[in-house]
Image (cartoon, grey):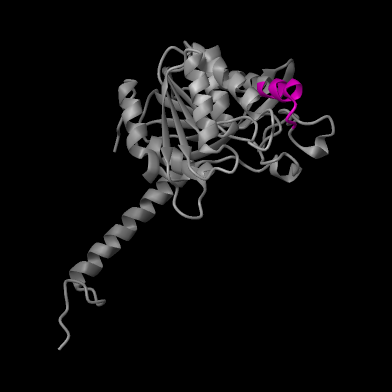
Amino acid sequence: MQMLGAWDGCPSVRESTLLRVVLLLVTLLVVSLARAQDTSMVPVVVDGQSVRLEMRIYKPSTEGKVPTLVFNHGSTGNGRDPNLFTKSQDFPQLAQFFVQRGWVVVMPSRRGRGGSEGEYDEGFASDRSRGYTCEPSLSIPGADRALRDIEVSIGAILTMPFVDPNRIVIGGQSRGGILSVAYAGQQPEQVKGVINFVGGWLGYGCKTVSTVNQEIFKRGARYPSDTIWLYGDWDFFYPLFHSRENFTAFQAAGGKGVFHEFAPPPGLGGHGIVARPDLWTSVLDDYLKRRGLANDER
């Protein structure tokens, strides 16, 4: 005779009812998150040019002004495929983490990226078909251009009726991560926290990678408060030893923060850890609490 435990493959009526309830709750959560997303074309003026920038906005059910994360996207690999320039930028797992805690998340696309108007021009070679350049005299001005886009984006975001201007956190993925650190150094009074996911400007294939990345990161050293740096092993663009060196240079320049490193699951790669909240939820929750920004609505 076969001895059966609590679950033998044939659910009882009670178990079937419980399963249906769980599935319904999961469905409602997914629908709720999908409806929380809005895509807006926001008019700005940057470098004397009037353009509309695409912004993906995730909002909680909370009424009134709430803390807001401005999360910035990265590059397009090597910059040689123009079809990737207009691909929408989205980080739904990160948005869910913050929305569940009562935050708004705004993801602006810089000029020429996603649905944003204007030309995408962030450190290309003179022959754009060659993609991003390793030459500092061209690459660093590309970062400066991106920072101007972020500045006007945040200026527009601060006017949104659901945004608490006194609780703005800036963050980003890859190029968006290093830009967020640098921006905080330029506008230290504007942001209350900085979240850097696998940040860097040039990939490790460039001989100038340390010179350029550290110069841009060190701009963030003027930010007087703690930043959080989140990196993964097996990152094709930014190996952990390189990113640790960037963090050391940032600290040597006076920057404050904590560097965390994670082992991603097989097949993911360190550059994709933003999509795995199970890796970083606890350290990011702790960071928000230390910054006085905990707003848990769960």
The percent coordinates of residue 165 (x first, y second) are 44, 17
Magenta highlight range: 133-143
Which quarter of the figure has residue 257?
A: top left
Left or right of 1 in this view: 144:
right
The percent coordinates of residue 54 (x first, y second) are 62, 33
On whether residue 135 falls in the magenta region, the answer is: yes
* Looking at the image, residue 189 lies above or below residue 149: above
Which quarter of the figure has residue 210?
A: top right
Give the residue at x 51% y 37%: 240
Q: Is residue 150 in view? A: yes
On whether residue 181 falls in the magenta region, the answer is: no
Of residues 160 and 246, the one drawn nearer to the viewer in this rendering: 246
The percent coordinates of residue 124 (x first, y second) are 76, 31
Left or right of 120 in this view: 150:
left
Give the residue at x 68% y 18%: 45
Magenta span: predominant SS is helix
Left or right of 51 in this view: 196:
left
